[in-house]
Image (tube, grey):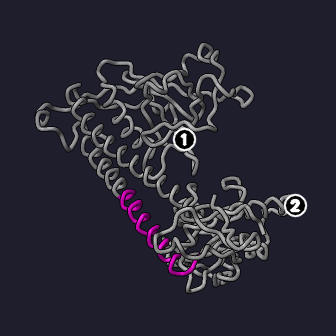
């Protein structure tokens, strides 16, 4: 937390702050002055016109502003446009707290779309022309404002208000440097964000390349040979057709009551822990008593087991599936998930994961039941047939796809490091204050 500038006494300390980290040319400059949001930004109140077809925007699960069509079906704004506000690029949107947001809510800048519509319940504002949107985006991302918003939200909750009144929101105190220092910080953050975006794009390209390669390395539905084979296997004939249940055993998870959870013991793997070729464990994940390992041996996960989602298994054309590593052995499988156990020597473990990811993704997109909230039917899955190559060809395919996975993983780790660096930098570039008003 930044320390107040106390050069001219306590009263001045209340109106001036200095961040921990400043660029050399500003280290001897005056501290940042406190001002109210309404003094440097104006509310955006432009109503969408009747039947206007502009992009409707929503908050995604990762708290970014996206097109509503990317996460929901239909476009509600086209039906009820009078309930929406029209915003343009570099406008800011404050979304009050809800079940997915912090108590203080969140403030986001519209940067990826030139124009859009948001619900009129949102508070939108536009900074004056001499302010730098990139700077203020970093300011709000750093959380420098959250202490005040949390207090305002707390007061409102105590008075029965679910949202912060507009007059109180726009009276929010913020710390403002001179325009030249704003621009310096904005340029720095813009450069860093460009690096992060480039790294994200690199990962997307690798993923798309892998998906395309996988489609070539495995036979299409109804065929018995892939379109692309390694040279030494090009004349080895067709893959062998086998019943799915002769190769893999499918076991679905079990629903446990919250009263059965414990703070320690054996890990309970839930749908939220399963990613796309990954498994993650967080502080809010649950355990079960160790005795459950003996009570439910069929639900224990072992190394090389393959766990996948039964409920809403596909997102962005990828399936939620992962291979269990030794570090996650002896975990228990929860409901909405299933595991695959290899029950034949004809299947190489590393190949099995890549094959199942491809096979189940294709199967889920073609055969999932339900509308909107799809799920995989294990009964129907067990009726399927699959085609497998020889073990040597399995090993070659697995090695190729493993190397791509490792490349994706290393680049993803690099991306996470860059994001952590940015988060740490934001804490130093912007001054924090415990003062409310």
- Quadrant of the image occupied by residue 131: bottom right
Q: Is residue 52 left or right of residue 150?
A: left
Magenta segment boundaries in residue numbering: 177-201
Kindly state the secondary structure of the residue where label 1 is placed.
Answer: loop
Give x and y (percent) for residue 20: 56, 62
Q: What's the residue at 41%, 68% (across, down)?
A: 191
C-alpha span from label 1 to label 2: 40 Å
Q: Which residue, given by chain and number where applicable, does mark 1 sit on?
A: 375
Dot 2 surroundings within 10 Å: few (below 14), some, or many (20 or more)? few
Vertical comparison of 253 with 18: above or below: above
Pick out the residue farthest to the top. Answer: 294
Q: Quadrant of residue 278?
A: top left
Residue 392: horizontal and vertical position, in percent? Answer: 20, 26
Give the farthest residue toward the right. 159
- 239 left or right, relative to 311: left
Q: Residue furthest bottom?
A: 129
Whether residues under marks 1 and 2 lie with C-beta atoms below 8 angstroms apart, the answer is: no
> Any magenta on residue 190?
yes
Figure quadrant of the N terminus:
bottom right
Q: Does 17 sit above or below residue 400? A: below
Decide which of tag 1 and tag 2 comes sooner along the chain: 2
- Magenta span contains residue 367: no
* Dot label at residue 160: 2
């Amino acid at each position: 937390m930044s320390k107040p500038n106390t050069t001219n006494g306590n009263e001045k300390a209340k109106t001036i702050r200095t961040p921990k980290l400043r660029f050399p040319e500003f280290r001897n400059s005056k501290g940042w002055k406190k001002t109210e949001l309404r003094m440097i930004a104006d509310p955006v109140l432009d109503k969408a016109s009747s039947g206007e077809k502009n992009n409707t925007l929503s908050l995604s699960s990762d708290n970014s502003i996206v097109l509503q069509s990317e996460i929901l079906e239909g476009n509600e704004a086209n039906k009820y446009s009078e309930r929406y506000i029209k915003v343009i690029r570099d406008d800011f949107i404050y979304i009050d707290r809800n079940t997915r947001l912090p108590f203080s809510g969140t403030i986001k800048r519209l940067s990826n779309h030139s124009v859009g519509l948001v619900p009129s319940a949102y508070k939108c504002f536009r900074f004056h022309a001499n302010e730098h949107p990139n700077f203020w985006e970093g300011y709000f991302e750093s959380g420098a404002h959250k202490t005040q918003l949390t207090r305002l939200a707390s007061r409102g909750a105590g008075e029965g208000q679910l949202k912060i009144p507009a007059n109180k929101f726009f009276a929010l105190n913020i710390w403002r440097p001179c325009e030249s220092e704003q621009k310096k910080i904005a340029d720095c953050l813009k450069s860093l964000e460009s690096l992060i975006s480039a790294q994200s794009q690199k990962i997307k390209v690798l993923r798309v390349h892998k998906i395309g390669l996988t489609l070539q390395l495995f036979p299409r539905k109804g065929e018995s040979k892939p379109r692309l084979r390694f040279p030494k296997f090009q004349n080895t004939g067709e893959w062998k057709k086998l019943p799915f249940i002769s190769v893999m055993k499918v076991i679905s998870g079990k629903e446990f009551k919250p009263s059965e959870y414990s703070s320690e013991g054996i890990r309970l793997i839930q749908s939220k822990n399963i990613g796309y070729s990954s498994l993650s464990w967080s502080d809010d994940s649950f355990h079960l008593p160790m005795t459950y390992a003996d009570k439910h041996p069929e639900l224990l996960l072992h190394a090389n087991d393959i766990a996948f989602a039964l409920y809403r298994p596909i997102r962005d054309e990828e399936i939620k599936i992962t291979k269990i590593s030794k570090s996650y052995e002896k975990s228990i499988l929860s409901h909405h998930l299933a595991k695959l156990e290899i029950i034949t020597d004809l299947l190489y473990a590393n190949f099995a994961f890549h094959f199942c990811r491809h096979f189940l993704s294709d199967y889920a997109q073609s055969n999932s039941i339900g509308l909107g909230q799809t799920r995989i039917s294990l009964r129907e899955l067990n009726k399927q047939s699959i085609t497998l190559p020889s073990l040597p060809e399995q090993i070659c395919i697995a090695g190729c796809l493993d190397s791509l996975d490792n490349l994706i993983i290393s680049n993803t780790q690099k991306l996470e490091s860059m994001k952590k660096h940015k988060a740490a930098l934001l804490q130093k570039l912007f001054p924090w204050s415990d003062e409310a008003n």
